[in-house]
């Protein structure tokens, strides 16, 4: 199975400041069709996960543009340009290029 | 708009089975994959497998392969996840999610396994 790792696992941030989460995979996530199926999810306390980013860098509808995704092959990053209070929660990367689909362990973002 | 509405919380005894439903609306049910995930209390997300609602084909994570069955009723636009031989470690929130790369999620169904 493809192992997904994230760092840091805990990220205290100051409101209005940027934040960055790293996600690494144990194998290349470039699929045979040329796409890279790396997605980011946000899970606010007590809520279901919500997809933010798909195929590395594509923002889902309704996701604020302060969220951005980048990376390639095995190394990916989620950035929040200016953290707001509503961004508190756990962020997961997930790969969809190999069976079984696998998630990273999650990064907990909270306010300092 | 796409909606996935799951059945209510369940409490089961060890060794029993549970069947969770996921009612889809707002899109063509048979056109998109439907995934099942679970999340143990305070833990991360775990993918269990998926079903193609169009033809009923399934793909299960090896971890659950012997105990889980996904089915669907296209006339009711509803998918089902049945997990058998329940253990206390199966206590978790179970989620369905649809579309490529799990774009849309249900509200979750809490399954508690306790004697």
Image (spheres, rainbow, N blue to C red):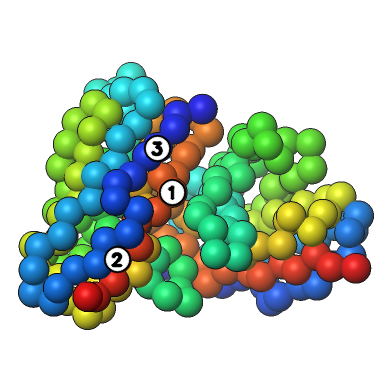
Label 3, residues with CA under 10 Å away: few <14, some 14-19, many ≥20: many
Q: Which residue is mark 1?
A: A105
Which of the chains bears the disc numbered 1? A
Give the CA separation, mark 1 to mark 2.
13 Å
The answer to whether residue B36 is left or right of residue A76 is: right
Closer to us: mark 3 or mark 2?
A: 2
Which residue is outermost to the bottom? A85
Quadrant assignment, res A30: top left
Q: Is residue A14 visible?
A: yes
Q: Which residue is mark 3?
A: A4
Q: Earlier in the sequence, mark 3 or mark 2?
A: 3
Give the CA separation, mark 3 to mark 2.
18 Å
Q: Residue at x 47, y 39 (%)?
A: A102
Horizontal and vertical percent for residue A67? 16, 60
SS state under label 2: strand
Horizontal and vertical percent for residue B62? 66, 32
Which of the chains bears the disc numbered 2? A
Which of the chains bears the disc numbered 3? A
- Asked if the residues shown at circle 3 and circle 1 are in contact, with their CB atoms under 8 angstroms apart, the answer is yes
Query: Quick check: do tags 3 and 1 share a chain?
Result: yes
């Amino acid at each position: 199975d493809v192992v997904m790792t994230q760092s840091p696992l805990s990220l205290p941030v100051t409101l209005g400041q940027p934040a960055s989460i790293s996600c690494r995979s144990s194998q290349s996530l470039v699929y045979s069709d040329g796409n890279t199926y790396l997605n980011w999810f946000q899970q606010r306390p007590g809520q279901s996960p919500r997809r933010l980013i798909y195929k590395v860098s594509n923002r889902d509808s309704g996701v604020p543009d302060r969220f951005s995704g980048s990376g390639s092959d095995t190394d990916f990053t989620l950035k929040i340009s200016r953290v707001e209070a509503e961004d508190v929660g756990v962020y997961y990367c997930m790969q969809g290029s190999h069976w079984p689909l696998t998630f990273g362990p999650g990064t907990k973002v909270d306010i300092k | 708009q796409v909606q996935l509405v799951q059945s209510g919380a369940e409490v089961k005894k060890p060794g029993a089975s549970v069947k969770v439903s996921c009612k889809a609306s707002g899109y063509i049910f048979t056109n998109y994959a439907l995934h099942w995930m679970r999340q143990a209390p305070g833990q991360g997300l775990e993918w269990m497998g998926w079903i193609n609602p169009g033809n009923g084909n399934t793909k299960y994570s090896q971890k659950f392969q012997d105990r889980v069955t996904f089915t669907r009723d296209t006339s009711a636009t509803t998918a089902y996840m049945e997990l058998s031989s329940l253990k206390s470690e199966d206590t978790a929130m179970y989620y369905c999610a649809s579309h490529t790369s799990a774009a849309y999620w249900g509200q979750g169904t809490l399954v508690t396994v306790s004697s």
